[in-house]
Image (cartoon, grey):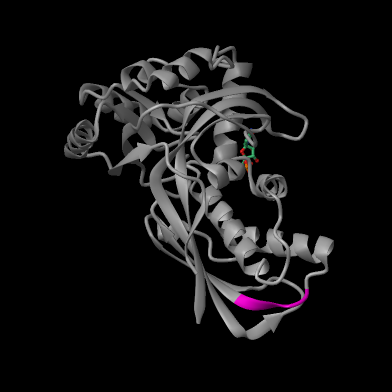
Amino acid sequence: MRTISVRAHGKVNLHLGVGDAREDGYHELVTVFQSLSLSDVVTLEIDDEETVATGSIVSGLTATGLDAASVPQDATNLAWRGVDTLVDFYRARHGLGSLPRVRIRIEKGIPTAGGMAGGSADAAAALLAAHILVTETMPALDQTTLDALAAELGSDVPFTLRGGTMLGTGRGEQLTPMLSRGRYHWALVFSKQGLATPEVFGHLDQLRDQGREIGPSLDTTDLAHALMTGNAEEVAGHLANDLQAPAVSLRSDIARTLDLGKQAGALAGIVSGSGPTCAFLCRSELHARDVLDDLLSEGVYSGATATGPAHGAYLIDG
Ligand code: C5P
């Protein structure tokens, strides 16, 4: 059996400014994404003996690795939806004929429901893998069309497809590349239990309705300048996340972890996206390891070190 394997990376938001809720339920964002070395690999196991002309070409899905037990194994999984979205688009627009049946295998290195775009990375990887499969016989889609399909799958999926350092606006799906010098070193602390993104956005609205002044942090000018210096200490002074207050309010363990990171000497600590992962910016790889060791010795659940920026989704085999 032949396979196509695509790797996609997780992310941290160096800046996550959240504006008002829109009529469609999404919030206007001004965010700065940085992709991290943490990654998932999505493999399509292709059964050329069996072809499918209608309905999903996916016959099943398995996940291994970090938090694999909490990854859905049915058609609700974002990787499964990524394959279906690409195939449905080709069927509707390009009269695609039959395709081989595939099974999806996901190797997880990004925490699930951790605020690091693990599900989005899987969606981006699956979209690209399906594109590689379909373009064995059909013309390729341009980047704009692939980005639009990615945005249908989730607000962070276009970024995980592209990677690097990007400004995200709209609901996070409208991307502009940003200049960024150097490499950044992170100590990441994961949680045993994830947080649901809609719950955190909803809680931010509630806190604001109750009169709490949380942002909106919509100005990224200082961070943009800091990123051009390549100096981690300067970048550390400009990390911001409007979802941090609601995440901390929902989960008191996050406040403790952020305190511990400070005590361990990190340059700065921030909740990653909607949490509960906490990301600590450090001076060097060695510093990140020291900070992580310190945090682990204080009894945090688990963690890893990572560097950024990393790549978008790319073919690693097949
Ligand atoms: O786009 P995605 O499906 O990843 O979003 C998950 C949920 O997060 C949305 O249904 C919404 O509740 C919330 N969200 C939001 N504003 C955004 C992005 C996500 O309110 N810009």
Q: Quadrant of ligand 1?
A: top right
Using the image as rendered, state which of residue 152 and residue 158 is in the foreground: 158
Side (left or right) of 259 relative to 95: left
Q: Quadrant of residue 140?
A: bottom right
Residue 315 point in image, percent of width and height: 50, 59
Q: Is residue 16 visible?
A: yes
Residue 176 point in image, percent of width and height: 61, 30
Q: How many marks?
A: 0
Side (left or right) of 200 relative to 21: left
Name the residue located 57 percent from the left edge and 40 percent from the top edge. Answer: 159
Residue 307 point in image, percent of width and height: 34, 38
Name the residue located 39 percent from the left edge and 20 percent from the top edge. Answer: 235
* Residue span colored magenta: 97-101
Q: Is residue 77 visible?
A: no
Name the residue located 52 percent from the left edge and 22 percent from the top edge. Answer: 242
Height in image: 227 above or below 315? above
Using the image as rendered, state which of residue 184 and residue 277 is in the foreground: 184
Height in image: 289 above or below 255? below
Residue 277 point in image, percent of width and height: 39, 38
